[in-house]
Amino acid sequence: MADSKPEAKKEGRPKARLPRGFRDRGAAEIAAERAVIETVRKVYEGYGFEPLETPAFEYTDALGKFLPDLDRPNEGVFSLKDDDGDWLSLRYDLTAPLARHVAANFQHLTKPFRRYQTGPVWRNEKPGPGRFREFLQFDADTVGSASPSADAELLMMLSDALEALGLARGDYVIKLNNRKLLDGVLEAAGIALDDRARRGTVLRAIDKLDRLGIEGVIALLGEGRKDESGDFTKGAGLSPDQAQRILSFVAPDAKDEEAHLNQIGILVGQSAVGAAGLNELEQIVKLLMACGYGPDRIVFDTGVVRGLDYYTGAVFEAQLTFPVQNEAGETVIFGSVAGGGRYDDLVARFTGQAVPATGVSIGVSRLISALASRGAKPQALQPLVVVTVMDKADAANAFQTVAELRAAGLRAEAYVGTQKFGDQMKYADRRGAAIAVIEGGDERAKGEVTLKDLALGAELAKSVESRAAWTANRQAQVSVPRAQLVSQIKKLLGRS
């Protein structure tokens, strides 16, 4: 009896799946993103800012103690060891890499150094609806100026960028605060300024006020909070009196601005850092008002604190005020799409020398969702022209025609699938093509080409009541002299 051989183990196929918190994006979203970036870029360059690119990975110690989520494994970032045994991390924002760049090139930079940068960032945080681990930011920063004028300029530039994207005044508000005020309140509440761990926990807690409400923040200021999934987040361990003093600052019950300022003065007490914060705010607001950026665009709000611990002065957040529907079909206010502030100590981690800096960051993906919810249509891809191929012998002619269209600045492709005419029309329709070019043997013998206006055809199909009426309507298809191909396509695209 012959020995039986064991069967070779079949190699398992990998599952076609995405990691949690990541997603694929299609052409429409990418085109919208490109249009938003280009609009913001023009505004930023108009203010004199210049582009900079930094790599996706940084040495983990360069990100340091300013990591975004100390309660998560891996400290909120994605990390790995390189061949030298050094830890590298994907950047969690664009500000920490900027600080490293400034420190490394400090002697060669013109100060103030003004740069903008756009690119993806990664956070190893718990994903949820609309909350991804990879997302795009668009930043602008001024490094080397301690003047409140630099903060005011960023606020004006952010306002201009939002309006350039089509948001009207009243659709958004930029809320302004100063972290020195909160430092003063914490100091008056008995929390030392050098107790960075506890202060960081407090900041992250009150930064979640809009999402968790007062009860949720009270729990995080105290012993901690368990969320809907059962995960427990350890709190700051404050007493009820300490927590109430902080809540009175971030969620004041004053009825008017004068009462609000009086309340802040009481909460800050004799704190010198709190008084400095009030003075800086007054200078910023004075400049904003002189330039026409009043409360219809930018307002003072003590509820804005920003969760990251590296902010040292002015902080601000752009919020959209109009209602939208969330994933559950509920009507909600869209909320924050941009934020920033002053971070005078970040570069000093590398150099030991204090370097004042201030910056703003726009959440591009979130902003695109907001614009879409308002019915705004950022510039899409250029209209597509599909050139049909009637048989294999026509392929060279079709590609020559496509080359001619592209040379004229049109977006065009030749069909490379089956030669069935019906399949080609279905393809052009599903691709969202504006025009199909048909040039078979009959058309070529006459020196003509047939143009099918797919965009107009789709509109006509909505208005006719029968197939007979649709068939009789020839507006959506015309034959033109071959020499007029480019001009007639441009004419049809202009009509569409």
Image (tube, rainbow, N blue to C red):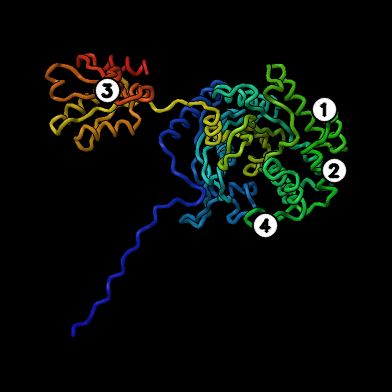
Inter-mark Cα distance, 4 to 2: 29 Å
Picture residue at 68% right of the left edge, 17% below the top: 291
Estimate how packed mark 2 is, as few (under 14), some (14 to 19) or many (20 or more) residues with alpha carbons within 10 Å: many
Identify which residue, 257 or 494, lies in the foreground.
494
The reply to whether callout 2 and callout 1 are in contact (CB within 8 Å) is no
- Evaluate if marks 4 and 1 touch, with contact meaning CB atoms under 8 Å apart: no
* Res. 188 mark: 2
Q: Is residue 334 left or right of residue 28?
A: right
Residue highlighted by disc 4? 232
* SS class, disc 3: helix
Measured in 3D between alpha carbons, the distance from the residue under mark 2 to the one under mark 1, in whole angstroms, is 24 Å
For this rendering, which residue is in front, 131 or 195? 131
Residue 70 in the image: state x and y as whole percent. 64, 52
| Marks 4, 3: nearer the viewer | 3
Disc with the residue nearer the chain's start (3 vs 1): 1
Q: Which residue is mark 1?
A: 256
Q: In this rendering, which labeled residue sits more in front, label 3 or label 1?
A: 3
Judging depth in this view, the residue of 204 and 365 nearest the camera is: 365
- Crowding at dot 3, Cα within 10 Å, few <14 / some 14-19 / many 20+, comes out as few
Q: CA distance from mark 4 to mark 1?
A: 38 Å
> Nearer the N terminus, badge 4 or badge 2?
2
Discs 2, 3 touching: Cβ within 8 Å? no
Rendered location of residue 267, percent (x, y): 85, 38
Marks 2 and 3, the one that precedes in the sequence: 2
Residue 226, located in which quarter of the rendered image? Answer: bottom right
- Residue farthest to the bottom? 1
Name above or below for residue 184 compared with residue 89. above
Residue 349 in view here: yes
Measured in 3D between alpha carbons, the distance from the residue under mark 4 to the one under mark 3, in whole angstroms, is: 65 Å
